[in-house]
Amino acid sequence: MHGLSMHGLSMSGLPMSGPRDGDGSGDGGLQGERTRLAWVRTATVLAAGGLGGAGVALRAGAPAGIALLFVPAVFCAFLLLTQTGVRYRRAQEALRRGRPLDDRADVLIAWVGTIAVTAGAVASVLAGVGR
Amino acid sequence: MDAPDNEPDPRFTLANERTYLTWLSTSLALSAGGVAMAAVSADVFIPWMRTLLAVVLVSLSALAAAMAYPRWRSVERALRSSAPLPPPALAPLFGYGVAAVAVLALILILLSR
């Protein structure tokens, strides 16, 4: 939106209209919603990756250790999904009051889960899943 | 984080978070692609070529996952010190890498028909 409309004017040169931002975020509070959806999307893909990866490894007859590599991802995804509401309210509060935001714990949890899926995927490929 | 000079606007923090999550999603998609490639029927791809393509995909996935958190941290640090953002140095590698795998896979599929 900012790239298309400079200085409060639309591409046609008319003044822009849009929702008033009650939280001071500049886009009617959609920043928090976009970020919330990004978290839910990532956690869902993480859970699917963990469960799907473990399922593929077990069905292909790979060692159980490879399937176990995927398990932390499912736990991390569960933790992230349970935190969705709390994280969203924290973000909205920070946007409304212009306060700093610190989601470092969730960022680390998401990273650990992704590393687990990646490790499981690398091990599955090297073990010859599908051979 | 790490002796900040000032606290960034929460909008920038959220934008950094979304970019970080996109890197993680990219890594997860590449992992899925790698495992799927390894599981493709041997009738379609030459086995060693199938393994090679799968290894390339999971290697890109590992690279994306490994750099995601350090990059999030460095962007946070840049936001707090009002410094320029670090460039996405490895982004072209992912584009070219996935494109190369896709073109090779397409050629192999056409040759197998």
Image (spheres, coloured by chain):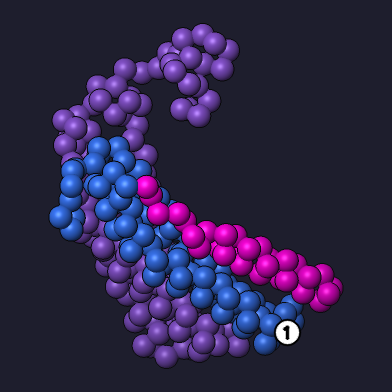
Chain colours: A purple, B blue
Q: Main secondary structure of the magenta part?
A: helix
Q: Is residue B8 above or below residue A69?
A: above
Which residue sits at x=78%, y=70%? B107
Q: Residue B105: name its quadrant.
A: bottom right
| Residue B66 visible in the current orientation | yes
Confirm whether the magenta stretch covers residue B94: yes
Asked if A30 appears above or below B4 in the picture, the reply is above
Q: Looking at this view, is B40 or B52 the one in front? A: B52
Q: Picture quarter containing residue A48?
A: bottom left
* A107 or A130: nearer the viewer: A107
Q: In the depicted view, which residue is nearer to us: A105 or A129?
A: A105
* Image quarter in which the C terminus of chain B is found: bottom right
Rendering coords of residue B20 (x, y %): 37, 54
Quarter of the figure with residue B111:
bottom right
Name the residue at 38% across, 62% down: B68
Q: Residue furthest top?
A: A14
Residue pictured at 66% horizontal, 80% vertical: B50
Mark 1 residue type? Ile
The N terminus of chain B, quarter of image = bottom left
Provide the residue designation for mark 1: B46
Horizontal arrangement in the rendering, residue B44 relative to residue B1 (left or right): right
**Residue A92 in the figure: left or right of residue B85:** left
Q: Residue at x 31, y 17 (%)?
A: A20
Q: Position of residue A127 (x, y in %)?
A: 50, 89
Determine whether the residue tagged by mark 1 lies in a helix, strand or loop. Answer: loop
User: Residue A70 lies in magenta, yes or no?
Assistant: no
Q: Position of residue B53 (x, y in %)?
A: 63, 77
Q: Could you say where residue B108 lies in the image, as x and y percent from the top left? A: 77, 74
Does any portion of residue A74 appear in the rendered image? Answer: no
**Left or right, residue A98 beside residue A60:** left
Tell me which segment is drawn in magenta: B84-113
